[in-house]
Image: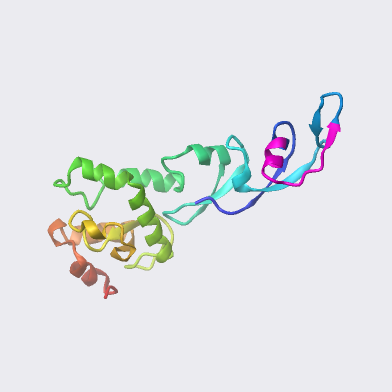
Amino acid sequence: MLLEQKIKIKLHGKGINHYLDKGYDISTYFCNIHNKYKVKRGTELYVNVKDLPLNSEKKVQYKCDICGGIYNIQYKGYITNCANKDMCKKCYYQLLQDQSKEETPNYNPNLEAELRKRRNYDGKIINWRKQVFIRDDYTCWKCGKKGGYKNAHHINPYHKNKELRYDVNNGITLCKECHIEYHSKYKKSNCNKETLKEFIMRIK
């Protein structure tokens, strides 16, 4: 997510009217030669990050919703990068790998292609993952490792429990290693709340 922050900018050209329209108090003078309002050369202003123009190249900070790390990116890059806006590059590419048949430990060949596509790119499931990570403070339930790449795991399987798919209480955070370990130990037919409870010993 984009972090709340104040960005220092230098006012010039079209930017003056942009920030005046946003309600910023800017000292201007009327230039008779150019017949428009101007500011003194070198005038600086601190603005809210969300008030930057969409094409701004100013560096801003965002927090990765997967690992919790803080990263810098050009504001226009953040705005236009719809696919992985709130993920760092490492976590985004890892997510793409984990969605492939070879790399995904919970791959289910019986899951319809359309359902899998909806699950991977569904805004609700992305928000669900985010809420699970925030609640667990980006910490693995099994080993206690904080930060790094994480999986939001459904306690009651996604494809068998439609009514619980977006229930935050039906999710826990596991690191990549523990997630793979669980699915290696308990095959698809055995993935449920009871085997997860046995694996973690923390679920009531």
In this view of the protein, which residue sits in the foreground, 156 or 69?
A: 156
From what the image shows, is residue 201 above or below residue 147?
Answer: below
Q: Provide residue 104's location: percent of width, then percent of height.
A: 25, 48
Say if the magenta span includes residue 29.
yes
Q: Which residue is drawn at 30% across and 46% down?
A: 120
Q: Residue at x 76, y 47 (%)?
A: 25
Looking at the image, residue 20 sits to the left or right of residue 114; the answer is right
Q: Quadrant of residue 192?
A: bottom left
Q: Provide residue 101's location: percent of width, then percent of height.
A: 22, 43
In this view of the protein, which residue sits in the foreground, 78 or 162?
A: 162
Q: Provide residue 37's location: percent of width, then percent of height.
A: 80, 33
Residue 100 in sight: no
Say if the magenta span includes residue 107.
no
Magenta part of the protein: which range? 17-30
The furthest residue to the top: 33
Looking at the image, residue 141 sits to the left or right of residue 77; the answer is left
Looking at the image, residue 68 sits to the left or right of residue 191; the answer is right
Residue 168 in sight: yes
Q: Quadrant of residue 178?
A: bottom left
Q: Provide residue 202's location: percent of width, then percent of height.
A: 29, 74
